[in-house]
């Protein structure tokens, strides 16, 4: 993703920061994707933003779309702004990076969106040597988004361990991102197996 961000900036003859500044001048009344991310991962975020917008999606990324807003502190005004923007977004993609762990906002955004709309997916950023995503902690409860063979987004249901520890794969295991976003009857979350319990 860093290379993608640098490539976009080079194609425009600008720095990554200048590209982000230009993108911030565009605001929409509706978004296909609310990108939950942290500014600590600016270069990765720009690469993901470029990937998603190049695929034709309207994407909200707070510090790209609304750079004047101060997110360094959690305030009622900031929360109202973020809540209103999530309200006009079809889905939330949680950009899972090393920096996400330190975010003041990302877990709150995920919880709000999950309760309000349900179309929440995790967009993992893997290191070059990693091949598979294993959702950390509660993120393993949500489907994750990856690219299919043709470079289109698809949503993958996470693998779940049954009560005996056996890993279970559910069918269908994946759907196109567009089908998932348009049809909220199956959020592609793992189903409860073996009753209630810890």
Image: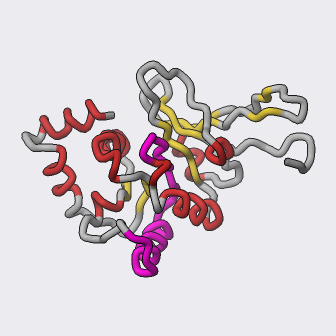
Please tell me in which quadrant of the rendered image residue 164 appears.
top right
Q: Say which of 151 and 92 sits in front.
A: 92
Tell me the quadrant of the picture where the N terminus can be found. top left
Q: How is the image coloured?
A: secondary structure
- Is residue 55 visible to us here? no
Residue 76 lies left or right of residue 46; in this view the side is right
Q: Identify the magenta region.
A: 73-99
Coordinates of residue 155 in the picture (x, y in percent): 58, 39
Q: Residue at x 44, y 70 (%)?
A: 82
Q: Residue at x 13, y 36 (%)?
A: 11
Q: How many marks?
A: 0
Please tell me in which quadrant of the rendered image residue 81 appears.
bottom left
Q: Say which of 150 and 187 sits in front.
A: 187
Coordinates of residue 36 in the picture (x, y in percent): 45, 54
Residue 178 lies left or right of residue 127; in this view the side is right
Q: Say which of 57 and 192 sits in front.
A: 192
Coordinates of residue 129 in the picture (x, y in percent): 45, 19
Q: Residue at x 7, y 40 (%)?
A: 13
Q: Residue at x 57, y 62 (%)?
A: 113
Q: Say which of 159 and 12 sits in front.
A: 159
Tell me, yes or no, whether the highlighted magenta stretch contains residue 157: no
Q: Furthest residue to the left?
A: 13
Q: Is residue 94 above or below residue 152?
A: below
- Is residue 126 visible to us here? yes
Tell me, yes or no, whether the highlighted magenta stretch contains residue 76: yes
Coordinates of residue 7 in the picture (x, y in percent): 20, 33
């Amino acid at each position: 993703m860093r290379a993608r961000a640098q490539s976009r900036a080079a194609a425009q003859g600008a720095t990554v920061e200048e590209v982000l500044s230009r993108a911030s001048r565009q605001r929409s009344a509706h978004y296909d994707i609310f990108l939950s991310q942290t500014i600590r991962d600016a270069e990765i975020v720009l690469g993901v933003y470029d990937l998603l917008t190049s695929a034709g999606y309207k994407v909200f990324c707070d510090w790209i779309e609304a750079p004047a807003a101060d997110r360094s502190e959690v305030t009622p005004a900031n929360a109202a702004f973020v809540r209103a923007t999530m309200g006009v977004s079809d889905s939330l993609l949680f950009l899972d990076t090393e920096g996400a762990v330190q975010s003041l906002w990302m877990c709150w955004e995920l919880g709000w969106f999950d309760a309000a709309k349900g179309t929440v997916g995790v967009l993992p950023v893997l290191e070059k040597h990693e091949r598979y995503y294993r959702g950390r902690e509660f993120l393993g409860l949500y489907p994750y988004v990856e690219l299919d063979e043709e470079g289109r987004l698809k949503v993958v249901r996470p693998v779940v361990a049954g009560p005996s520890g056996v890993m279970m794969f559910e069918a269908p295991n994946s759907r196109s991102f567009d089908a998932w976003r348009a049809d909220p009857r199956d959020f592609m979350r793992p189903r409860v197996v073996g009753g209630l319990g810890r």
